[in-house]
Image (spheres, grey):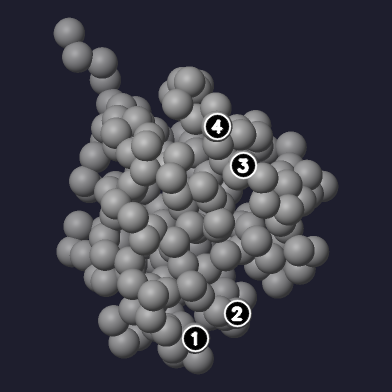
Amino acid sequence: MAGLYSGVHFQRAFYADPEFGSGFAVLPVWELAATNLLDHEGLWIPRESNQNVLMANRDKLARYLIDGGTIVCFDEVNQPWLPVRTWRLRPARMETLRVADHPAVANLTPEQVRWHSHGAYDPDPKATTLIDDGRGAVILFLDEASFPGALMAGTLDPDCHVGFGAERTRPLLRAILAWVRQPRRLPMAAD
C-alpha cells in the first residue's frame, strides 16, 4: 500500500513502525503526480498531509477511485481534493460511539475506537457508516457505491497516534489494513 508522506514526524514514525511499516511503500507527496497509483493495493492519506499537493492532484485521486483503487484517508478534507461527503470541524460525542457490524471494523468495540476525532462527516445514503456517535456525526465511513473503487475516510487519527508511540489505536489500524488487503473484484477493462 502506498503511504503518502508529507514530511511530518509522526507520519515518518508510523511508516517505520515495526508492526505496520513493512506494509507500506512510502510515497513522498511531491512524487504523487508522477506515481502510477494502480501499482499499489491502496493509498493511505494520513492526517496533516499537504493539502495544496492533494488539491493539485484531485483529478488523479478521483481517477484512481474510478479505476478501482482504494483510498484510506484520515486527513481533514477542508478543501475539495477528495470526492467525499461533507466534512465539518465539529465535535462528535465520543461517549456514545457506535461501531457497525462490517468486516472493515470487525470485532472492534466502541471502547477500542474511543479517543477523539477531528471533526465529523455528514451521513450519506450511498456510504456505509462504520463508526458514528449515534447523533448524526459520522466518524468513519466506507463508500463502495460512488465509484468502482473504495473510499474509506474518517476523522479519527490512528496513524498519528501510532506515530507518537501510542498503543490504543492499533486495533483499528489492524482491522482497516486487514480489510484493505482482502482480495476484491476489480472492474473489468473496457473493450
Few, some or many residues within 10 Å of mark 3 (<14, 14–19, 20+): many
Identified by mark 3, the residue type is Tyr
Report whether 135 appears left or right of 100.
left
Q: Residue furthest front?
A: 52
Q: Disc 4 or disc 2, which is closer to the eye?
A: 4
Whether residues under marks 1 and 2 lie with C-beta atoms below 8 angstroms apart, the answer is yes
Q: Is 73 or 106 nearer to us in this picture?
A: 73
Circle 2 is placed at which residue position? 115
Few, some or many residues within 10 Å of mark 2 (<14, 14–19, 20+): some
Identified by mark 4, the residue type is Trp
Which of the two labelled residues, at mark 4 and mark 1, occupies the earlier sequence position? 4
Query: What element does badge 1 sit on?
Result: helix
Few, some or many residues within 10 Å of mark 1 (<14, 14–19, 20+): some
Circle 3 is placed at which residue position? 5
Which of the two labelled residues, at mark 1 and mark 3, occupies the earlier sequence position? 3
Q: Disc 4 or disc 1, which is closer to the eye?
A: 4
Q: Is 116 or 68 nearer to us in this picture?
A: 116
Identified by mark 1, the residue type is Met
Circle 4 is placed at which residue position? 30
Which of the two labelled residues, at mark 1 and mark 2, occupies the earlier sequence position? 1
User: In the displayed structure, would residue 80 be above or below residue 165?
Assistant: above
**Quadrant of residue 29 within the rendered picture:** top right
- The answer for how far apart the CA atoms under marks 1 and 2 are is 7 Å
Circle 1 is placed at which residue position? 94
- The answer for how far apart the CA atoms under marks 1 and 3 are is 28 Å
Q: Where is residue 49? Give x, y as percent.
A: 53, 50
- The answer for how far apart the CA atoms under marks 4 and 1 are is 35 Å
- Quadrant of the image containing the N terminus: top right
